[in-house]
Image: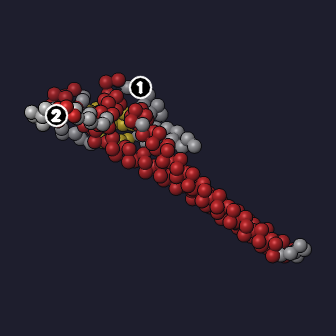
């Protein structure tokens, strides 16, 4: 179930702040300038897109199982009511059965809508968490280039841009470097001095 269509294209603003950490020289280059970042690319390089997809798939599978159980229970309730009316129900009883059937259908549709909203909410939460993880690094790298605003790159929002203001590769490289495991120590280098065994 591919739920992550474009993780970040709709949300256009990461942050807009005045950055005082840049040097006077870098600020002079492009005061108040705008940096761009493609969070889809950053997510892919970190493997976060597949992680988010996997989390949402698990949540979707769980909700799907709950909906299937709810549907079965509602169907059983309807069948029990129908059987209780006997083989020759009156017109009034048939109307009552039809009304109850509509109520049960509406109840299931509400459960489906609730499940969709829950998945959408979880998707939003995961994306917001990722954006918050990226934010400080993106702001720092932008400030180092004298840029004070960071926008999420989107074809809908950005018609054209100077490649020098795109900080995607720099942010992704730094984050990838942070996630690499530390090298294992060399056992020989940890041997006590003078150990001849």
Q: Can you see residue 68? A: yes
Q: What is the residue that sits farthest to the top in this orientation? A: 163
User: How packed is label 2: few (under 14 Cα within 10 Å), some, or many (20 or more)?
Assistant: few
User: How packed is label 1: few (under 14 Cα within 10 Å), some, or many (20 or more)?
Assistant: few
Q: Is residue 145 above or below residue 66?
A: above
Query: Quick one: 193 or 56, which is closer to the camera?
Result: 193
Dot label at residue 73? none
Residue holding disc 2: 197
Q: Can you see residue 31? A: no
Q: Quadrant of the C terminus?
A: top left
Dot label at residue 160? 1
Query: Quick one: 96 or 73, which is closer to the camera?
Result: 73
Q: Pinpoint residue 31: horizontal percent, then vertical percent.
A: 23, 32
Q: Residue at x 52, y 52 (%)?
A: 59
Query: Quick one: 185 or 133, which is closer to the camera?
Result: 185
Indicate left or right for 31 with 63 as reference.
Answer: left
SS at circle 2 = loop
SS at circle 1 = loop
Q: Residue at x 80, y 71 (%)?
A: 82
Which circle's residue, 2 or 1, is located before the other in the chain?
1
Q: Residue at x 48, y 53 (%)?
A: 121
Q: Is residue 92 above or below residue 151?
A: below
Q: Residue at x 72, y 69 (%)?
A: 77
Q: Quadrant of the N terminus?
A: top right
Indicate left or right for 59 with 75 as reference.
Answer: left
Q: Pinpoint residue 2: horizontal percent, then vertical percent.
A: 55, 41
Q: Pinpoint residue 25: horizontal percent, then vertical percent.
A: 16, 28
Mark 2 and mark 1: Cα distance apart in space: 67 Å
Q: Pinpoint residue 196: horizontal percent, then vertical percent.
A: 13, 32
Q: Nearer the viewer, mark 2 or mark 1?
A: 2
């Amino acid at each position: 179930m591919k739920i992550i269509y474009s993780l970040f294209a709709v949300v256009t603003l990461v942050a807009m702040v005045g950055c005082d950490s840049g040097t006077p020289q870098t600020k002079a280059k492009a005061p108040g300038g705008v940096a761009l970042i493609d969070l889809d690319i950053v997510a892919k390089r970190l493997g976060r897109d597949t992680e988010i997809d996997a989390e949402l798939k698990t949540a979707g599978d769980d909700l799907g199982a709950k909906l299937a159980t709810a549907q079965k229970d509602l169907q059983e309730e309807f069948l029990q009511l129908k059987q209780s009316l006997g083989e020759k129900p009156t017109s009034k009883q048939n109307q009552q059965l039809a009304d109850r059937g509509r109520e049960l259908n509406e109840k299931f549709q509400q459960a489906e809508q609730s499940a969709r909203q829950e998945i959408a909410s979880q998707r939003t939460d995961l994306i917001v968490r990722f954006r918050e993880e990226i934010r400080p690094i993106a702001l720092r790298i932008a400030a180092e280039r004298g840029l004070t605003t960071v926008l999420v790159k989107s074809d809908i929002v950005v018609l054209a841009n100077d490649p020098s203001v795109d900080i995607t590769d720099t942010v992704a490289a730094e984050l990838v470097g942070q996630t690499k495991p530390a090298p294992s120590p060399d056992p020989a280098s940890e041997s006590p001095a003078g150990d001849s065994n």
